[in-house]
Image (spheres, grey):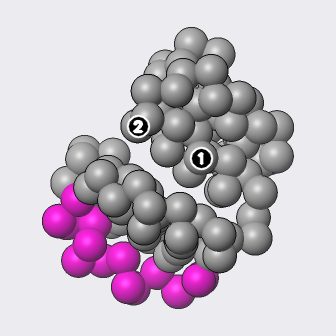
Amino acid sequence: MYKVVQALYFKDIDEAKLFINQIKPLTYRLYYQSYILLEEGDLDGAVDLMEKLSTKWMKDALLAEHARKLNNLPNAKHYAKNAVLQSKGLQRYLLQKTYEREFRI
């Protein structure tokens, strides 16, 4: 999972694709696969994968990115805030800092 996260952080989609199938927890694999599809511009494919996620913060984080890709900043901020509220621990901290940087929330 570390290699996928690192590759996505540096916007190296091809590198992330090399390691995505090695992520054992299905929920995380679907989350990162959806994120890759969003980065590639396949918004419909990403939404299809998002529907399979049961973890609320993951879905909201992806919906925030989806709305941002559609230049819908109010919705993106709404979903970003929800993702932070639904998460906890290290994940909450990472989301909060990311959204402070990207959305100024």
Q: Kindly state the secondary structure of the residue where label 1 is placed.
A: helix
Q: Is 39 placed left or right of 51 in the picture? A: left
**Can you identify the residue that label 1 sits on?**
63
Mark yes or no: residue 44 visible.
yes
Q: Looking at the image, is 84 positioned above or below residue 87?
A: above
Magenta: main secondary structure equals helix
Residue at image position (62%, 21%) is: 74
Q: Which mark is residue 31?
A: none
**Can you identify the residue that label 2 sits on?**
69
- Quadrant of the snapshot with the N terminus: bottom left
**Residue 3 magenta-highlighted:** no
| Residue type for callout 1 | Leu
Q: Looking at the image, is 7 positioned above or below residue 52?
A: above
From the top left corner, tell me how far across and down residue 37 is, in percent.
Answer: 36, 61
Residue at image position (34%, 59%) is: 42
Q: Is 91 placed left or right of 32 in the picture? A: right
Tag count: 2
Q: Looking at the image, is 17 positioned above or below residue 44?
A: below
- Quadrant of the snapshot with the C terminus: top right
**The magenta stretch spans which residues?**
13-26
From the top left corner, tell me how far across and down residue 69 is, in percent.
Answer: 40, 37
Are the residues tagged 1 and 2 within 8 Å (C-beta)?
no
Q: Is 14 placed left or right of 95 in the picture? A: left
Circle 1 crowding by C-alpha within 10 Å: few under 14, some 14–19, many from 20: many
Asked whether 7 or 71 is in front, the reply is 71
Q: Kindly state the secondary structure of the residue where label 2 is placed.
A: helix
From the top left corner, tell me how far across and down residue 102 is, in percent.
Answer: 47, 22
Residue at image position (23%, 77%) is: 18
Residue at image position (77%, 47%) is: 87
**Residue 18 magenta-highlighted:** yes
Q: Is 38 placed left or right of 48 in the picture? A: left
From the top left corner, tell me how far across and down residue 62 is, in percent.
Answer: 56, 50
